[in-house]
């Protein structure tokens, strides 16, 4: 199994320590009244103890339309045979339903491949569980074919790695839906467990 990934440009600029200090950039535990401007993770990070801070522009938005700055897909997921290095499948990950021009969500369930953040869980039975995309969906994907077997809408962003456990011979998959400011998904505090179907 290979990773989920983003296919979006980033623009990163090293900021000399004197400039970062003048702007008030400090570790979040030592904020000195400086503003990170509500920016993305990494925007104005001080990198304390080094000669440079870093300014990150994730390249997400065009100025007027607020659309993502390249054509889709913006993110995807792939499976790689680790013995041979061969890509078994590679597909977009994430629907367009929360994206659209001028910040208006389209509501369209088109699998365009959205930016994503969070890992995948691969079960021994060959099912990939992932909820990293910005569409707030958790998916079960067949490891062999790449096809979505099941999905469910989460109450907030699933930018976390699912986990699995077994109780009394029944398998459960759990995801924390905390959301993510950089991915622009709703914030939440839920932990949701799904029970796998029992074998008949």
Image (cartoon, helix red, strand yellow):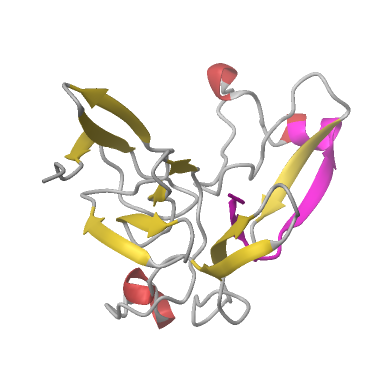
Q: Which image quarter: residue 44? A: top right
Q: Which image quarter: residue 105? A: bottom left
**Residue shown at 76% from the left, 35% from the top:** 20
| 74 w.r.t. 58: above or below | below
Q: From the viewer's perspective, is 189 left or right of 5? A: left
**25 or 196: which is nearer to us?**
196
| 19 w.r.t. 47: above or below | below
Q: From the viewer's perspective, is 86 left or right of 191? A: right
**Residue shown at 16% from the left, 43% from the top:** 199
Residue 2 within the segment the image draws in magenta: yes
**89 or 157: which is nearer to us?**
89
User: Is residue 128 visible in the rendered structure shown here?
Assistant: yes
Give the residue at the far front of this rendering.
200
Give the residue at the far left of this rendering.
200
**Residue shown at 26% from the left, 25% from the top:** 166
Residue 74 in the image, given as x and y percentages of width and height: 57, 69
**Residue shown at 28% from the left, 37% from the top:** 173
Residue 70 in the image, given as x and y percentages of width and height: 63, 78
User: Is residue 60 visible in the rendered structure shown here?
Assistant: no
Residue 26 in the image, given as x and y percentages of width and height: 65, 25
How many numbered marks have been drawn onto this rendered protein structure?
Answer: 0
**164 or 28: which is nearer to us?**
164
Q: From the viewer's perspective, is 168 left or right of 122? A: left
What stretch of residues is rendered in magenta? 1-20
**198 or 35: which is nearer to us?**
198
Residue 133 in the image, given as x and y percentages of width and height: 43, 57
């Amino acid at each position: 199994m290979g990773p989920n990934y983003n296919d979006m440009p980033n623009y990163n600029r090293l900021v000399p320590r004197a400039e970062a200090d003048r702007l008030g950039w400090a570790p979040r535990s030592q904020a000195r009244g400086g503003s990170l401007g509500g920016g993305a993770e990494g925007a104005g990070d001080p990198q304390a103890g080094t000669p440079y801070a870093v300014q990150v522009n994730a390249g997400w938005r065009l100025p007027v339309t607020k659309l993502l700055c390249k054509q889709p897909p913006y993110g995807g997921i792939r499976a790689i045979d680790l013995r041979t290095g061969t890509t078994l499948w590679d597909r977009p990950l994430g629907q367009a339903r929360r994206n659209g021009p001028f910040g208006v969500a389209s509501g369209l369930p088109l699998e365009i491949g959205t930016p994503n953040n969070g890992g995948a869980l691969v079960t021994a039975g060959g099912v990939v569980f992932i909820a990293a995309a910005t569409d707030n969906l958790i998916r079960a994907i067949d490891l062999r074919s790449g096809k979505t077997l099941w999905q469910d809408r989460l109450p907030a962003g699933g930018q976390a790695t699912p986990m699995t456990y077994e109780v009394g011979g029944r398998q459960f998959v759990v995801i924390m839906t905390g959301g993510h400011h950089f991915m622009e998904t709703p914030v939440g505090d839920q932990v949701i467990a799904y029970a796998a179907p029992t074998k008949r």
